[in-house]
Image (tube, helix red, strand yellow):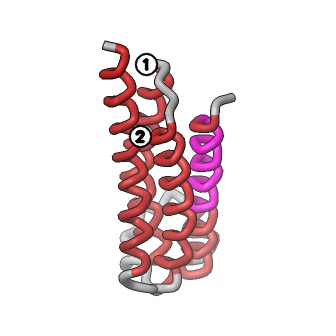
Amino acid sequence: MITEMWALFASVILGFVHIFAQALSMNAQRGVDYNVGPRDEAMPPLTGVAGRLSRALRNFLETFVLFVAAVVLAQLVNVHNGLILRGAWLYVVGRVVYLPLYAFGIPYIRSLAWGAASAGIGLILAGVFLGTMARA
């Protein structure tokens, strides 16, 4: 398996970490009965760590789909270069660092981690573009 696919694999695992952390924190705040029930009744927004983990999960999912698309695109056009490799791992590391920074409410550095992860997606796309242009 090529390295970008390992980065994708790691990101899927990270997605599950986000989901489980958010679910556990929501259970702590709202109780297990709410989580396993139909959730028909309106509840106030999650607060504190539970709220931050919920927002971090949503933020992860917003960027994850773009990361998947970029990695799959690189695979489909069969372009694998240093930009793609670095971009894939920059995304993974940025997202791994982002989660605890957001969970503990650490500003600015959290935004840098988000920016690094987003730059990783940009590097992948640049690598795909330059790699395909080199073949043309």
Boundaries of the magenta span? 5-19
Quadrant of residue 29 within the rendered picture: bottom right
Mark 1 closeness class: few <14, some 14–19, many ≥20 residues within 10 Å = few
Residue placed most toward the observer, 96 or 47: 96
Kindly give the residue lying farthest to the front in the view shown: 134
Question: Is 98 left or right of 134, judged from the image as shown?
Answer: right
Q: Which residue in the protein does label 1 denote?
A: 77
Q: Residue 89 shows which numbered tag?
A: none
* 111, above or below 106, in the image: above
Disc 1 or 2, which lies upstream in sequence? 1
Residue placed most toward the observer, 28 or 84: 84
Q: Amino acid at mark 2?
A: Ile
Mark 2 closeness class: few <14, some 14–19, many ≥20 residues within 10 Å = many
Who's the residue at 57% across and 53% down the image?
15
Where is residue 1? Give x, y as percent. 69, 28
Task: Find numbered disc 2 in the image and state the secondary structure of the residue it sits on.
Answer: helix
Quadrant of residue 45 within the rendered picture: bottom left
Q: Amino acid at mark 1?
A: Val
